Structure formats: C-alpha cells, structure tokens
Image (cartoon, coloured by chain):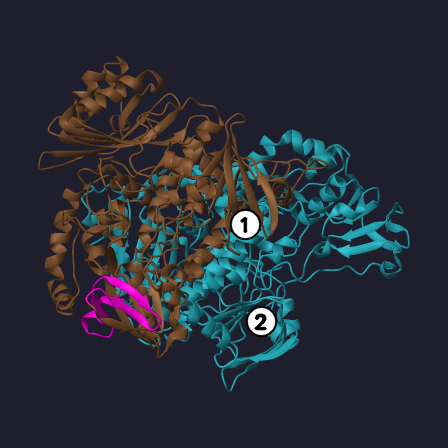
Chain colours: A cyan, B brown
Amino acid sequence: MTALARSNDPLSVADERVLAWLDRFEGALTRRDAPAAAGLFCEDGFWRDLVAFTWNIVTLEGRDAIGAMLDAQLDAIRPRHWELDEAATEVDGLTEAWISFETGHARGRGHLRLKGDEAWTLLTSARELKGFEESSGPRREKGVEHGIARGRRSWLDRRRDEEAELGRSLQPYALVIGGGQGGIALGARLKRLGVPTLVVDRHERPGDQWRKRYKSLHLHDPVWYDHLPYLPFPDHWPVFAAKDQIGDWLEMYVKVMELNYWPLTECRSARYDEAAGEWVVELLRDGEPLTLRPKQLVLATGMSAIPNLPDFPGMDGFAGESHHSSRHEGGERYAGKRAVVIGSNNSAHDICADLWEHGADVTMVQRSPTHIARSESLMELSLGGLYSESAVASGITTDKADLIFASVPYRLMPEFHRPVYAAMKERDADFYDRLRAAGFRLDFGDDESGLFMKYLRRGSGYYIDVGASELIADGSIRLQAGQVERITPSGVVLQDGIELPADVIVYATGYGSMNGWAAKLISQEVADKVGKCWGLGSDTTKDPGPWEGELRNMWKPTRQEALWFHGGNLHQSRHYSLYLALQLKARMEGLPTPVYGLAETHHRG
Amino acid sequence: MTALARSNDPLSVADERVLAWLDRFEGALTRRDAPAAAGLFCEDGFWRDLVAFTWNIVTLEGRDAIGAMLDAQLDAIRPRHWELDEAATEVDGLTEAWISFETGHARGRGHLRLKGDEAWTLLTSARELKGFEESSGPRREKGVEHGIARGRRSWLDRRRDEEAELGRSLQPYALVIGGGQGGIALGARLKRLGVPTLVVDRHERPGDQWRKRYKSLHLHDPVWYDHLPYLPFPDHWPVFAAKDQIGDWLEMYVKVMELNYWPLTECRSARYDEAAGEWVVELLRDGEPLTLRPKQLVLATGMSAIPNLPDFPGMDGFAGESHHSSRHEGGERYAGKRAVVIGSNNSAHDICADLWEHGADVTMVQRSPTHIARSESLMELSLGGLYSESAVASGITTDKADLIFASVPYRLMPEFHRPVYAAMKERDADFYDRLRAAGFRLDFGDDESGLFMKYLRRGSGYYIDVGASELIADGSIRLQAGQVERITPSGVVLQDGIELPADVIVYATGYGSMNGWAAKLISQEVADKVGKCWGLGSDTTKDPGPWEGELRNMWKPTRQEALWFHGGNLHQSRHYSLYLALQLKARMEGLPTPVYGLAETHHRG
C-alpha cells in the first residue's frame, strides 16, 4: 500500500509501473533474495546509497555490485515499506518516481528511474533515525515548562551553563575543526539531533572566512543553490550575495541556531587514543592551551585552505610584494602598480579584475588551458532547472533539488553535462571567439563535460565569468601564456624568455588536498592511511584512477576510525552535512552501523 | 475569468456561487453603481478594508455605510479583476472564499463569506503597490553587476555609505521611534519597499527590550503566532520562546534585514513643520544631540511603555524597595523578603511567580476581577485552528491565518469568542474552582467574550496562565482582595484595614495609552487632537464608547498629519506593519491616497 495508492488520485500507467516494480523489489528484499533484487535493475543499472543501506556513501554499478551489497547488508538493514510518494512521470520510456522506505533504524527517501520495467538508477538516502528524530515541527520543544518550580534554569542560564562546561567538565561528542559554511551547517544538524558538538575556528568571528577576502568577492553560485539547512535566506536576498552579506549571515546563523562555536581557536594537534576510543586534541583558545577528548573528529577546514605555493627559482629574491591568492585582501593598495598574477582559474580572474578595478597595470600568466563558463549561461543551461526562481515556483524545493542532483550517478554525469556545454559553446560563441582572439587558451574538460565535472574531479581548472573575461578580451587585463622559469628581483621570467616586470606578484596557484590537514594536525601516517580527499578517480587531468564512483573520503567513513572530512560548496555543505550528521548520531546512540564498501586508499594526498 | 476558472479543476456549487457574486459585484463597481454593489451585501453585512479601498483601516457596517464608502471612493480607487483564487468551501449555507482583485494603484487579496447569495463579511486588503513591488523572489536583485567597472562600490561599501550619510547628509523619509518587534517589523517592510527609514531605540542593543526583563519571562503566545515578516523562526524553535531567544532573534533580524537602526538613541522632542511638510525631531544619539527632518514619524514605542504608577498616600515614605512592574528585573535579590505585588494581571502573576521562585514571601493584592486563561486551553480552543502545527500542516500559512483572523469584523468577534470561553470554563472547571476557593475573583470579560476581546478593548485585565495560578490555588502565593488605602513605611494598608508588611512593593498597575508618547514627545495639543490609542469603543470596562469598529489610531492615518502609531503583539506587529508600510510608501511615491473615514477623536488618551 503506497501513500499515493491511499489517496484518491487515479493511478497513471507510470504510477502502476513504479508500483509493480516496488512490489517485486520489496518481495525480493523481504525474501532476502539479493540476486532477484539485483535482477530488477538494468544490466548496467546504478544504485547510489547515502547512508541508508551501506552506512556509507557508495554508488553500486551493475547488477553484480548491487547483488553483492545486498548480500552483505540485507540482514542488518531490514528494508521495508516501499512507497510511491507522488505521481510518477514518464517521458520517452523513462519513468521517474519519488519513493520512500524504511530500514530497521532509519526512514529514507529515494528516487527511481525505470527504463521500461527495469531500474536504471536508484537513489536511496537516509532522512532520519527512528527514535532519534530532530525536535522540530510537531516534535518541537515547548520551551518552557508551564508550572513554576524553584531553582529552574532559564534558556539563558542553560546556554551559559553549556558554554561554561563544554570543553571543561563536559566533553563534546563531536569536535569540528573549521567553522566556515561546512562546519556551521554540520554543527546545526548535530545540534538539532542532540549530539554535543563544538565547532572551533581560528578567525575572530564566524563569517570572517568570507569577510577577510578581497572586497569585490561575491558568490559565483546563485542564491537558490546556497541556502544553509533549516533557515533559508529571505527571498529578497540577491542572486549573487556579497562576501560580507554571507559573512554576516553565517555569524547570525551560529547565534540563532545556538551552536557551540569557539572563535580564535586553533587546533595544534590531534591523536587518536585507540584504547579510550577518543581523540586527544590540543587547542589554543584565544591564547590559552586546552586539551579536548571528543569521540569523533571532523575536519571541516575547507577545500581551499592549504595554499599551493609554487617553488620557482628566485622567489625569495623578489624586491616587490608577493603573496598567494588566499592572502589577497584587495587591490586598493596597488593603484598604478604593475601586477603579475600567475594562474588563470577563479581566484586569478577575480584578483586580476580587482587589481584592474583599483587602477593597477595587470598581467595574467596562463599556464594551462582553462574552462570559462559565463555565470548567466551556467544558471540558465545548467542549474536553472533545479535551483532558480522558476524551479521554486514549480515546486522543486531545495531538498528535492538536492536529491535530484544526487540521483545522477557520477559515472553518468559527464553524459548529462556534455550537451549543456555544447549548448553553451553555441550560445556564447562570440564571447569565446573574443577570448581566443585575445590569446586565451580555452578548454571544456578532457571529455568536454565542463565545469561541474572539473570541480568534482580536481576542484580547479575553471572560472565562472562574472566580468573578468571581458577585461581579458578587450586587453584591459593583459594575458601572457607560458610557464614560469624564474622570479627575478624585478619581475617574472617565462620559459620562452619573456620578462614581465612587476611591483606585485600574486600566486593564484591553487590549493592542496584536505588530506594535508590530516598530515598537519594528526600525522603523516594517518594522512597516508586515509589517502587523498576529493576526486572521483576519473583518470582525467589531476584526477588519477582507479575509478571510485564517489568523492574520496568526503562525508563518510575513512580508513582512520572516528575521523571525518566535511566540505565543499554551500550546496554540498548543506546536503551532505545531513548524512554525516546521521552517521555521527547513530554512532553516539550505539546503533549498529555496518559500513559497506569502505574505499581503498590509492593516492596519498 | 478567474484564476480558478482558468485551471482545469471542475467548479463546485460553492465556486459557482462565489463567481456569480463576484460577477455581479464587479459589474456594479464598474458601472460605479454604489447602491447596487452595497445591495449585494446582507442588510447587516460587513466590509472590512485594510488600505485597499479607503487608504485607511475601516470596518463598514451595513449596506448604507458600504454604499457611502463606495460613493466616495470608487472614482479614485477603480477596482477591477475580481477573481476566485482557490476552491470555495460551503458549510451550513455559509460559503467562504479567497479572492483577489486590483485597484488603480494596488493588488489586493480578500476573503468573502456569503450567506446564501449575499455577502455577510468581505475583507479587502492591499498586498502591494503596482510599480512599487518589493524586490523579492522573481524581482530580487542580482546583487552584483556582472562586468567589472572601476570605482564600483561593494555591498559593504554601500552599507557603510548609507550608515554614514543617514541622518546627516541624507534624511530618512520615515523615522520610527522605538525598535522593539513593532519598529523592527515595520523597518523591514519599509526596507524591502525602498523607503529610506531609520529606527531609533534607547537600548544598547536590539532585543534588549526583551533581554532586560525578568529572567523567567517567555512568550505567552505560541511560536506560530509570533513570526516576524519574511524570515520565520526555524522549525525547531520552541512553542514558547524565552525572552533572550527573542532578544537575540531581533538583533540578528536587524542585521540580516539590513535595517538602519540606531541603538542608544533617545527621542527628546518632535514638532511638525507644516510649511516644510516635515518633522523636526531632536535626538540624543549615544549622548550626541542631533536633529532629523523626516517626512513621516512613527511612534512604535510600545503599548506597555508608559508605566501607570498609582498615587497612593504614603508611597514616598515606604522604607523598603518599591518599583513599577516594568522595572522588575528579577527576583534573585529578594530571597527571604516579604514582597507585596499590587495588581493581578499578566505582569503581576509573572512577577509573583518569579519572586516566589526565588524564595520571597509573596502576597498578591487583587483589586478587581481578573480573567485567567490557561495557556494550553487557549492554544487548543482559540489559536490552534489558525496558528499551530496542525494549521501549518493543513496549508494555513502565516499570511492566510493573519487574513482569516482579520476577516472577522470586531462587531462580530465577541460572538465568535464566547463559545470558546464557554468551552474553556467547562474544560478547566476544576482549575477555576480551585482558584475561586483560594479567594481569586475571576471574570471572563463584561460579556463573557474572554481574553482577546479584553486585549483589544483595554489591553489589560487578564493572565495567560503558565503556572502562577497553581501557586495561588495552593497558597504558595498569598492572595489578598481589596483596595489599597495607603502605603506605610513598613507595608501596605488596605481599605478594610488589613495590613500587609513588606520589604518590597511591586506596582503591577499597568500602562498608559500610547497617546501619552505623543504628549511627551510632541505636545499635549497634538496628543489631544489625535486622542486615545487602542480600544474599540465597545462601551465595556475601560473601553468607553462610542463604537469605533477598529482599534483607535493604530496603523492608520491620525488627526495629526504624518504621525502614525504602530504596535501590538508580535502577530499584530507582523500583519499590520504591511498596511502601515504601504501607506508610507504610497505617500513617498506621491500616489493619491484619499483617506476615507478618518476617525473622530472622542477621548483624550
């Protein structure tokens, strides 16, 4: 019996098809007949699971992989109650449906694509743990016990008690290192789940991660894609929020979501005490050394937090000013100066524009081809269907959009994306021609799959154009292709002998893997055991194989017990914080969490 | 052609009935045939208008009043495009429908109740001004101009520019005195409408209005009733929020809604310069004198901001500590002391409980019968249908709930409320019996219409029980009925000779009309011209007639040009701030705003 079947709406052919499939699927699962269940998928079908069946984030590719997972997990997971949640749709033989289900310990939501009568893609995602649901909506707390009692503590008393005790008489269950959007979103989820959590960050105030960047910085993703959990931006929020707006929002969010957040706190070291089953973490809180003993350690230190500073001969002898892009605070001081920016990705473009805007004479050094996607085109051709005003109007909530986004297996994603970028090339042909004419070397990814795949595979290699490309096309920002040979006291020398005199050099040379944080804070040994973070194993530039099918080590168990990585853009921080939070909550409550498909380590950072 | 008629849903009998009525109504209005339009109402029908037809907040009672209004306003208002927005409902011959319409300058929404084929109640409310819609949703700003330009100002630059200029080189169009929930909600609406506005408040931080109250204070209204505009509380917010939670929320709201808000700013005086058509307002901002010249002045100083301190003989000679309830910061200091609280309304109960909780020996002096409604009963019997988790689940948005609430004419409201309180008496009979047995004198309003009518008529005379009544019933708080004759150095003497020895006396003796602020800040002359604020003219205790049919002077034009009063509970601050904001915006933009039915002044404060 499904939710839809219980309603009075008549069932369509698509509904009937989905219901019949769910019926067969549930039958096979109930009989613990893994081969039969796997046989309901296309030969090359996919099942992506977010913590519902695998206590992991895994994509199973093909019937054999699906069968093997079910063989391993069915007894522990005990799935049941598969329902069709709303009317299914069918276009050209492809049927799509929203479904729900339960396991022994969780309630889940899923998305199903049928080709004919076989499953092509199935997404299963855990939404909440039974008996440990968030105290929200109908489960919200009363806030005050009616009836007066002597010695009762007020909300403020209790907040202050918690603040005073946490890290002293009371250990957090989870310690989150890094309080940007990632740490904050996760902190909010854990708070609502009742997991005692502390978020620490080295900045003075929440949001400083954004405030302290160069003045002209805006989000390059549109507002609908960027909401934090629980508290969406009000609907007058601009499409592209300014850095200080986001900074203020994060600060407010920390306050009203009542997170335990220590600013001005640096993590010095962490080691796992296996005997005690807890971490020993040395912190410096506003100058005061402190040891914490959390059960779980989350590194939410940012994908872009370990600067990749290059090692060019002569760098130390440069007579002018030089810094990595992460330290660029703004172009105000460089009016009339000659600036050379080495690199041609997002930061390089933003910083070149910022320097030009403030009257510097700017040269960009492009070392390798770069993918450029105009912001408008990206919004209309790529994100618009899921994250836009019209998506909102057509009933695609943020949660639904996130799940649709998550329902496409990474293996298929390039196929989904190539037509988008083919259309973009056509739409923006003039723009690209002008860039080429200015000498800019363009690419669209090794397999023409564009920006988002580059982001997933390597986290670099592109610029979302919000204006700097026009300055390159018209020569306002000078462009120089080539490799850097050395730095002289007065500028940059390229391998072909060209000299670029400079008063300031900005190294927009990217960032290292988050794994570097494990090395820095824990040990090289643990970092090596855990291996590289991010990347799909696509065997394309900067994303070596073998194929992983998921982002390495992100939001899921790693080869180091009780160590987790959290990060990504606002969209990922919002969506995947749910699954990481559920994994932590389950462990705190002692639920069985048999992990299936823990990834091998193939690369060391 | 209506929105519903354009959809594919089949029309019900109720829909047909509403459509037929709208058709006749639109026909009469289009022909400017006021009597015919009025004739479509029941003989004793009501039309409540919120700024759509009258540029005022007015309830027209009966066909004659409706006809007279239409006669005066039709040519200017030019109503049209009456549509049925969603399926109408019919129960026992009463048909209810949501409608929309336009006028020359506004888009409106309405609610209609038909008895048979005649209108019994019609609510018309302006929702937005054509050409001056809020920049939200599909109209939201982009936030950044793609394309880089030299000298462009960032979001932060522009915020800082505005902050630096406002009140100096740039005058606010509207000045709002008082930055509690009322001033803040109005400030947010005006901000979104692009009306240059400054909110000033004497406290150190937004939210201090709540923070500085006694420690145990919680909202007595449930969370669904209390949202601010645009940014609802997240859904884990407790049913009854604590004062500091609300304080923090208000502070955050001011920040993320980007209000111009000056804390630590006191208004010293204001006078209207008729020639210049502007106010001359003397402020003291953090000690610095400053003159502002806004076009519009809004007093949002709080319904409960002018303490009514009684004038009992001997008050000055009291040897202990005494204060008005508004200055009661908490019972911590009074453990073991004898406290006498004079009064038996909300503050008196809360303060008695607070004192008892902290170990004081407490006596409440009840001077007149008081209405007690248990919080749970109030939620279930009165508010629950519109403001509750189940209301949310059944699709009653906050906006819809506000409009349904507003759709009941004040004349009919006691009728709607009496059955609620009859049910309450029955449900809580034991509770009331115990209170009576303890000597408490109960009432349910002059006409048994209960709490909300008392709130509207006089803003006093009740307690929403969150626990103190139990302490009275069981004698933990001692109760003494009677009138105060005099205060002696050692306590309180009642008219029947009873002496109550006291170390501390709290005068929970209520507040004066908001009109007192006009006297204090502007002049007695203006205060007298404007007359009393609040109250319906019901000719019941503390609400002298004649019948006004609306709250006096609230959120609508007064007898003093460019002077407005804003206030009320969170619900009213949220809902009525819309209409006040639209009135101010229309004036700023120079739209014609012919006011119909400006109320007479019958009472002086």
Q: Nearer the viewer, mark 1 or mark 2?
A: 1
The residue tagged 2 is A530
Tell if the residue under mark 1 belongs to the same chain as the one under mark 2. Answer: no
- Label 2 sits on what residue type? Val
Residue B602 visible, this orientation: yes
Residue drawn where x is 47% and y is 61% of the image: A577
What's under tag 1, amino acid-wise? Thr
At which x and y percent is residue A23? 24, 55
Q: Reply yes or no: does residue B413 show up in magenta.
A: no
Residue B525 vertical placement versus B286 (above, below): above
Residue visible at 14% across and 47% down?
B447
Crowd class of label 1 (few under 14; some 14 to 19; many from 20; radius 10 Å): many
Q: Residue at x 37, y 50 (%)?
A: B227
* Position of residue A520 measured from the top left corner of the image (x, y, whole percent): 66, 72
Q: How many numbered discs, if any? A: 2
Mark 1–mark 2 Cα distance, whole angstroms, equals 57 Å
* Residue A598 vertical position relative to residue B521 in the rendered view, above or below: below
Q: Which mark is residue B265?
A: 1
**Viewer-side residue, A529 vs A237:** A237
Q: Is residue B470 magenta?
A: yes
In the image, the segment drawn in magenta is B467-496
Where the C terminus of chain A falls, by quadrant? bottom right
Q: Dot 2, crowdedness within 10 Å: few (<14), some or many (≥20)?
A: many
